[in-house]
Image (cartoon, grey):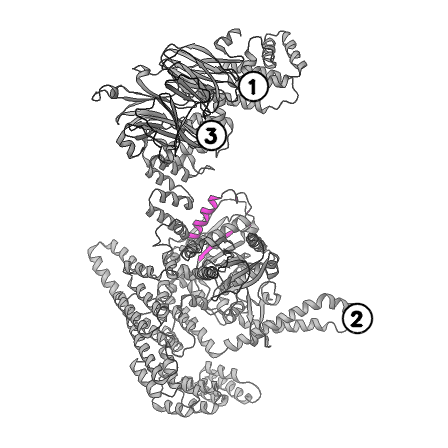
Amino acid sequence: MDCYTANWNPLGDSAFYRKYELYSMDWDLKEELRDCLVAAAPYGGPLVSLLRKPWRKEKAASVTAVLEIYSASACLWPWKSGPVVSLGWSAEEELLCVQEDGGVLVYGLHGDFRRHFSMGNEVLQNRVLDARIFHTEFGSGVAILTGAHRFTLSANVSDLKLRRMPEVPGLQGAPTCWTALCQDRVAHILLAVGPDLYLLDQSACSAVTPFGLAPGVSSFLQMAVSFTYRHLALFTDTGYIWMGTASLKEKLCEFNCNIRAPRSRWCSRPRSKERAVVVAWERRLMVGVMRPRASSILGGLFVLDEDSYLVPELDGVRIFSRSTHEFLHEVPVASEEIFKIASMAPGALLLEAQKEYEKESQKADEYLREIQELGQLTQAVQQCIEAAGHEHRPDMQKSLLRAASFGKCFLDRFPPDSFVRMCQDLRVLNAIRDYHIGIPLTYSQYKQLTIQVLLDRLVLRRLYPLAIQICEYLRLPEVQGVSRILAHGPVQQKDVSDEDVARAINQKLGDTPGVSYSDIAARAYGCGRTELAIKLLEYEPRSGEQVPLLLKMKRSKLALSKAIESGDTDLGDVHGVAFVPTGAPWFCKHQELETLKDLYNQDDNHQELGSFHIRASYAAEERIEGRVAALQTAADAFYKAKNEFAAKATEDQMRLLRLQRRLEDELGGRFLDLSLHDTVTTLILGGHNKRAEQLARDFRIPDKRLWWLKLTALADLEDWEELEKFSKSKKSPIGYLPFVEICMKQHNKYEAKKYASRVGPEQKVKALLLVGDVAQAADVAIEHRNEAELSLVLSHCTGATDGATADKIQRARAQAQKK
Amino acid sequence: MAFPHRLDAPELPDFSMLKRLARDQLIYLLEQLPGKKDLFIEADLMSPLDRIANVSILKQHEVDKLYKVENKPAVSSSEQLCFLVRPRIKNMRYVASLVNADKLAGRTRKYKVIFSPQKFHACEMVLEEEGVYGDVSCDEWAFSLLPLDVDLLSMELPEFFRDYFLEGDQRWINTVAQALHLLSTLYGPFPNCYGIGRCAKMSYELWRTLEEEEDGETKGRRPEIGHIFLLDRDVDFVTALCSQVVYEGLVDDTFRIKCGSVDFGPEVTSSDRSLKVLLNAEDKVFNEIRNEHFSNVFGFLSQKARNLQAQYDRRRGMDIKQMKNFVSQELKGLKQEHRLLSVHIGACESIMKKKTKQDFQELIKTEHALLEGFNIRESTSYIEEHIDRQVSPIESLRLMCLLSITENGLIPKDYRSLKTQYLQSYGPEHLLTFSNLRRAGLLTEQAPGDTLTAMESKVSKLVTDKAAGKITDAFSSLAKRSNFRAISKKLNLIPRVDGEYDLKVPRDMAYVFSGAYVPLSCRVIEQVLERRSWQGLDEVLRLLNCSELAFTDMTKEDKASSESLRLILVVFLGGCTFSEISALRFLGREKGYRFIFLTTAVTNSARLMEAMSEVKA
């Protein structure tokens, strides 16, 4: 066991630092690391390297640079675009390549081109001198130093807003060093020009001096910001290091060393009291730890075998070189307590006890007793569990967990979930740390990152089976876990046709709960696969979800047809999909008459256009002339629509309107908007018989109608004389029964009887019954020998008076039957 | 009397839940605007609202004064105005004018618009155009199902008919689907679904989509209603166009039943005041006569009067104790029944006065002739006379439509002359009405045969025989035809009568039309339920032009109890008539089913025609 702490380096009073190998690198670097542009993503992310030679030395060199992307354990494709200034990874693990002309190319993890954006014209003209990619709360930002020594930055590349920083006064050459800071959600730039420090924010450039900086600094060579942007280290040409808060207002410590041209990175542990900066130069690595209240710093030296590159992480520094990939961090408290030489911490005792127990030695009991006497068993178990989390080697994890579970046996009420969760987490961590997966996350990073993000990253790396296994293992709800992976997975497959992918996704998913096809489609669209997105949307059952995305993809026609298909016309309206074919007529009819007219005009819908003008002639126009004009337009439209009937009818109406107008002028009274029939009736009622007849002739009113009309009008007037004259004017086209009826309606039995005699034989019985002459009706019926008529008369025989008639009919019937 | 329900008839689900739901939602919406407020109600929503929440409930939730939404400025002095309206443009203009008037006067008030049953984007657009969108808050009162009776749910959307069948506007389909969705969440899924018509199909599909979106909710629930049948009004216009002779239908035709209640005027109540009567199963007298052919109603009522008298008479010879019992327990019931009886007798008399005249009988005779398809010439001249005499614009129009549908359109000569006559009688603006009717397929012209055949022969010379046949089919389907005659034969809609049809003991559904005609819609429903599918009805579907628009969907779940399988929800899209309801109630009694009706609105021939008419603005 003693040797376990062999790689621990004590630094300061109480802290140990350790460096352990994550992987031996398997990358096939042809050049020295120092000749490459290298970038690594935080949280155990991928690495990228790009040979920088070709552009440095001879521009015309025929050597194609190769952009290589590696997992943390160590793909590649030729670089065809322009010179790259800087490489970096975004928070979504997208590779950002900042080119000399200010263009930024965004690639996926697998080298698939995602998109491209430019950092603006100013950058384009002045070229890019240097660029940094930094991470903020919003995502990943890019800061650029242009050839004109101006800074341009964007705090979030996925929502690109360029900010041009103010000029630095008196800046002649390039700043000696600079970095992007992010404080209070605002991105700043800190730069050093010789001995002067400037802080650039959006509005101003201010000179700053670090608090308590030792005099005699001639130039700042390097600056390093901590992972959380809280701390800053400045390195001068004299080998002096100043460490303090990023606001420069507080100094933490300072110290001198004799190093030139280092690369420095912060290395700290969350919640640790001590901060450390890791400085690498040539082949040596120095860890500078500051102690509170101490003005000096202790430097620990690690010797590196090769040129290395440092990647700051949340709780340490990743160091990789041509052959190895290592992790340097401060030993966490729990581990330290347990493994420190001669530690009497409860956890250490518990671990010891368990070991003895395995050896079947009675010492186990002694150790255990000791812990229990102190009443620290719970603490011991917790310590073991925590320490297990921070161990990289599975065997150490196991032994610590074994100890914890051993200790647990002696506790009554130890909540099991922390232990179980740790076991689960470690399994997941070990799985992803595997050489083939190559995501060397530490426990604290994992907790910070959350399982969801981790799953997304696995999906991004197309490690679907592993991701699914993890979900199933952690029993994540389907919506968060498996379904999401299933959904997002295949979209990123590139080489398969859209149709096949869509079908495959559908087959895999079917109607799995929690899967939203529109989400998948949105993702596919995000990957630039519009056609696939459309195919996927076909499977989306909710049209409400289809339409907005289709619109976003600028497929308004399809969106429109979907909206129509959905039957929910309102859907079309809401999203402003062309108003025309769906809700339009309804809406226009009530709101925008002009639009409606244009619509009909456009469609050459003359029939509707005609109707439209007719409607207008009633609603919009007051004056007769206007109305007639509207009707004329309508009639023209009807002719165009080959609806001659409507056209003629409209023309008739125009004539009628004009006539009615004249009648009103000449005779007074109201005629306008009466029907033809009513107009004539009004004339007759007003005693203008001549005019009525003239009108009837003009409009070719059929005889039948005229007779009905006159009959009714005269009866209303009770002008019996005129009626009789009229009835005798010629043979009635409607028969004389109506005369009888109308007289009876006016209760004029006397007049009715006159006409009853003139009623034709078929209707005579009816007429006679109407005037109440049952006896005569019976006679006629008998004469006709008509059974129906007989029974009709019979039904009218009521009371005693008609008794005789009834008998007569019965007799006639009997006779008829005999025959 | 006549036909009591069979003993094994299934229980109806309790639809009062729908009322409670609507009420709670409304109260919630009102509470969203705390403090005193004035409520403006659209006229069309007043009666439905009355059935859901009466004035005292509204007052409880701080509604101060009630106003009707009409075209004049409001005099409300309240600081908060709440509008309860249908999503119509004119209502939006009204709200906007109020708000703008306040703005001019420098007043600030709170405005809230509650749309029922849903909000349309176009409405918001109007508010926006009028510049008041920001001043008004909008909400939806998803009140789409009003239980008018134990077996009748109405959406109270009379405009559905015109909007969909004339304007082709599909806005309301979503509302229908939502309503169906609500029913299935409350009363379990429907294991068997049938439907016919384009709108039915679309509503059904949209409804299914809604269900899928929220799956899981209805799954595993026991279905309470075994079948659902969706039917478009345009599948059967004929039935809706016929004069109704069943009591409830007659009352509707004569006095207009509005939202389940009717205003009987002085001529019925024989006093100078009119009386509002709620017509539903709770009215015992009405419940017994509603489905009766009118010829039986009078006899029944007099019998009932005699029984009532007998019950009154019992009190003679009672001792004091019995008398006390009688007064405390029975008298109130008897009095109530007495009152109802006198109302219905009054109504009957009034109907008799109107309907037993010769005119009415001739009208019925003509209708029957049209349905049976004989003496077409005579019927046509009857209609002409009807028009010439200006009997009634709506009636004339109805007869013309009936003639057109039963005859596959009017022959061109009649089409022109009847229209000319009509325009002369009732005013030229009806030119638009005719264009509407033509669009809806209610009044059409027979395709001039020879031109088509000429076209056909020309085309068929160019192609093979087989294709020519297809072309003929295509030509014949060019004009939307009703093919009523063939359907009538196929489905045996005109019962063969030997001797007198006994209306007292009806044999089939034809009794609702005096034994002359079985309502097409009801027959189709009967046939499909019998077969449990559309199988064997291909010819009928073809004739109805609905070959592609009929569907069945059966789930193979056995969870439905035999009781629920005898409950059938019939959904009429575009409205149904009381005659159809009576016919199906009759069918239910015969077969041991119980029908539940869901309609966009209760309709009748006059309402259909009015919906198609263009009235001068």
In the foreground, A762 or B67:
B67
Marks 1/3 same chain: yes
Determine the chain carrying the residue at label 1.
A
Which residue, as the protein is rendered here, is positioned at the far right? B320
Check the image and report above or below for A58 versus B429.
Answer: above
Q: Nearer the viewer, residue B407 or A726?
A: A726
Q: Which residue is mark 3?
A: A452
Do badges 2 and 1 share one subunit?
no
Q: Is B589 left or right of A604, judged from the image as shown?
A: right
Amino acid tagged 3: Gln
Residue behind mark 2: B319
Other residues around mark 3 within 10 Å, as few (<14) / some (14–19) / many (≥20): some
x then y, percent, for residue A431? 46, 21
Position of residue B395 measured from the top left corner of the image (x, y, whole percent): 43, 72
Magenta extent = B202-231
Q: Are marks 2 and 1 in contact (CB under 8 Å)?
A: no
Q: Which chain does the numbered disc 2 sit on?
A: B
